[in-house]
Image: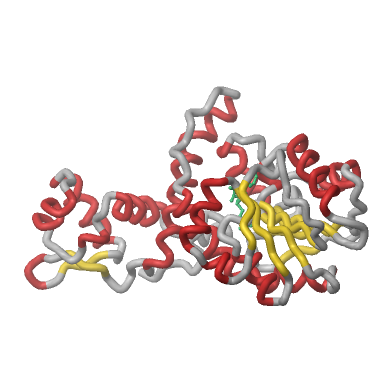
């Protein structure tokens, strides 16, 4: 059984990975089954301490899905249909979305309080989004530098994995990446960004931003996670550090722009943090109230889960 190329929950309708495979692989990874392979069911029980009956059911289901196979002597091992280890963070992030969609859409519809979801594991979140960003960063940075060809410094807000910062540094810009302390910790431990010359800045961008000034404030994947009040605050903070001639790039899902943005909006709904796929008109209002002039043209980024980019100066 071939795995779909897009293992995220943002794959087009009808092309998402089998939800059973996503949930079973997530459970097998989180309980340590995968790392204890190969082994018979008895050996895996002894190595993992898991419930024998439940483990048998899960192992058989993973065989049925082509993720595992049984070799001579009954030992389970990874089969040709197993996801690559590098795909696991995306699968686990997808599983987290599935759980959240399953438990939260109905209470949100009824206007009831939703239970807090499982805390995001910063490492898994980092790796899942890094894999997505790596595939698209060159193209996203291309369009930014076509719009701001003279830019020599960039602030990557909510940069998380820093894939965009890295791509900007490859083009000769100096990059600073800001994120919350837990995410900056992961970036520091991994060491890649600092080694490439990316400066790390920790703290909430609603409270503080580095002094700069910066030729480009790059906001990818953050504004749809907040409401208008927060986005207004963020853009006002950016106005202080982006001088005349510099600009802002907002990479986001714009409501009504494509069917995929409507599906992404559900993810924002279940995250229950005030986020949404805001409209182009809302972005224009928030940015102009903060003192930016928004370009007339909005660019759609093809093959990127229907994201668009707005530029403002
Ligand atoms: C969805 S991720 C986007 C990551 C990356 N920019 C991308 O496009 O792939 C949102 C990031 O914003 C960060 N973030 C959220 N609120 C923040 C805040 N108040 N200050 C700084 N970073 C924040 C999160 O920690 C997370 O790393």
Residue 98's spot in the image, x, y percent?
46, 46
Q: Tell me the residue at 20%/50% (across/down).
A: 57
Q: Tell me the residue at 91%/46% (across/down).
A: 291
Residue 306's spot in the image, x, y percent?
68, 59
Location of the N terminus (image quadrant): bottom left
Residue 36's spot in the image, x, y percent?
21, 60
Residue 6's spot in the image, x, y percent?
51, 65
Q: Tell me the residue at 79%/44% (across/down).
A: 237
Name of the residue lying farthest toward the bottom: 171
Front-most of residues 185 and 148? 185
Location of the C terminus (image quadrant): bottom right
**Residue 260 shows up from this direction:** no
Looking at the picture, the colour scheme in use is secondary structure
**Residue 183 shows up from this direction:** yes
Q: Tell me the residue at 46%/58% (across/down).
A: 189
Front-most of residues 258 and 159? 159
Front-most of residues 210 and 242? 210
Describe residue 187's horizontal placement relative to residue 92 as left or right: right
Residue 3, quarter of the rendered image: bottom left
Tally the marks. Answer: 0
Describe residue 212's horizontal placement relative to residue 99 as left or right: right
């Amino acid at each position: 059984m071939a795995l779909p190329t897009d293992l995220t929950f943002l794959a087009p309708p009808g092309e998402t990975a089998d939800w059973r495979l996503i949930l079973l692989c997530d459970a097998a990874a989180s309980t340590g089954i995968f790392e204890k392979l190969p082994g018979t069911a008895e050996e895996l029980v002894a190595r993992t301490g898991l419930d024998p009956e439940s483990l048998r059911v899960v192992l058989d289901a993973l065989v049925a899905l082509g993720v595992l196979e049984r070799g001579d002597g009954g030992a389970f091992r990874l089969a040709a249909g197993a996801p690559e280890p590098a795909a696991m963070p995306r699968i686990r992030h997808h599983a987290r979305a599935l759980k959240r969609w399953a438990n939260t859409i109905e209470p949100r519809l009824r206007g009831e309080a939703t239970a807090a979801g499982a805390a995001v594991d910063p490492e898994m979140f980092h790796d899942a989004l890094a894999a997505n960003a790596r595939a698209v960063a060159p193209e996203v940075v291309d369009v930014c530098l076509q719009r701001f060809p003279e830019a020599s410094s960039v602030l990557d807000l909510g940069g998380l994995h820093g894939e965009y910062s890295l791509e900007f540094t490859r083009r000769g810009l100096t990059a600073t990446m800001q994120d919350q302390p837990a995410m900056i910790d992961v970036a520091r431990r991994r060491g890649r960004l600092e080694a490439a010359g990316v400066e790390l800045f920790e703290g909430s961008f609603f409270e503080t931003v580095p002094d700069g000034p910066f030729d480009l404030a790059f906001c990818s994947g953050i504004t749809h996670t907040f409401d208008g009040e927060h986005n207004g605050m963020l853009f006002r903070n950016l106005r202080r550090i982006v001088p005349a001639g510099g600009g802002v790039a907002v990479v986001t899902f714009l409501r009504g722009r494509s069917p995929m943005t409507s599906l992404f909006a559900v993810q924002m709904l279940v995250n229950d943090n005030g986020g949404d796929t805001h409209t182009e008109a809302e972005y224009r209002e928030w940015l102009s109230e903060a003192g930016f002039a928004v370009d007339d043209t909005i660019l759609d980024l093809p093959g990127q889960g229907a994201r668009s980019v707005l530029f403002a100066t």
